[in-house]
Amino acid sequence: MADNHLQNPIFQDADLARQWLEARIWPKGPVCPHCGSFNATKLEGKAHRPGLYQCNEPECREQYTVTVGTLFERSKIPLNKWLMALYLLMASKKGMSALQMSRMLGISYKSTWFVMHRLREALREGKFSGPIGGDNKVVEADETYVGGKAINRKNKVPAKEAAFALVERDGKVRTFHVPKVNAKTLKPIVDAQIHRDSYVMTDDATVYPSILKEFKGHGSVNHSAQEYVRGMFWHINTVENYFSILKRGITGTYHHVSQQHLKRYLAEFDFRYNERKNLGVTDMERTEKAAKGIVGKRLTYRRTRQHKEAEAV
């Protein structure tokens, strides 16, 4: 099925890719990224590149394409390859290494590495729509640690990084890279991200009782006593299942993720989980939703080249 989708003309032709992107970024017609006006004229002919518009507002008069003001701005990589990369990333449950992506796109590893980080930036939610959970809803909270193992490592092994996840049962996940797992770092997150009427489920970590007093209820399972499910209700299996996908992707696909870029990898796995097949979202629909996240974001190579990840097949 994925191979059939890769034959889609938008992945083969840059002009068709631009038209596809315009229909999703500009559903009501061209919008000037400089002044927000809908009043524009399409510039056509050999003297102008395809998809070029000029704003008709007297105080603006700027020229633009659909990629201006987005993550794709000023990129020399054809737009159809950008969309193919986005589709491949959205169709791969555990992610795809930059080396594998490079071979499939036919561009250099360095360019592919940058493309993938730009796409992950598009998946990050700049502002959440509101807290998850609510009345008669359960939110599971747990933490995990991401980092390489010391086996066969000649040099010093970097410290593991902490990731804190909130998952609403039958709903969405929100994962945060935190410096430490303690009340000071976790309380602001749970206060902002979980609805007060929610029932929050955790393990027996001592940090949770003190920061969950204001919620409708708090239940826990005693992992230290080998208790993982009690009464079919008390468990954190949902968030642990999500962590299993995250860790299999990082360990098996990316192998190493730097502290600087962990937030982008978490956004990648969060997005795929929140737009998963079990919720009725197809790979192409997931790609369309992800494409809308490119607007208003810029990520230069200078910002991403530090602490470059070593990704392997």
Image (cartoon, rainbow, N blue to C red):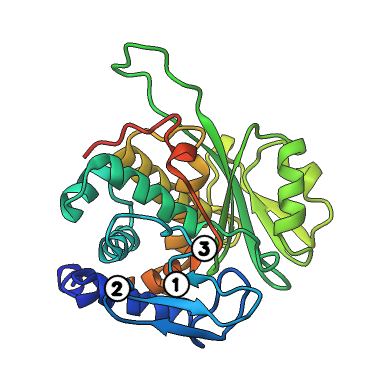
- Tell me the mark number nearer the camera, choosing from 3 and 1: 3
What's the residue at 32%, 71% (across, down)? 49
Amino acid type assigned to the residue bearing label 3 in the image = Gly
Q: Is disc 3 in contact with disc 1, using a CB cutoff of under 8 Å?
A: no
Read off the residue under disc 1.
Answer: 289
Give left or right: position of 259 versus 212.
Answer: left
Q: Secondary structure at mark 1?
A: helix
Residue at image coords 33%, 73%: 48
User: Disc 2 and disc 1: Cα gap in Å?
Assistant: 15 Å
Quadrant position of residue 23: bottom left
Residue 279: percent from left, percent from top: 44, 75
- Residue indicated by mark 2: 17
Camera-near label (3 vs 2) is 3
Q: Name the residue type under label 2.
A: Ala
Q: Secondary structure at mark 3?
A: loop
What numbered label is drawn on residue 69? 3
Q: Is residue 94 left or right of residue 224?
A: left
The kind of secondary structure element at disc 2 is: helix
Can you see residue 281? no
Q: Quadrant of the C terminus?
A: top left
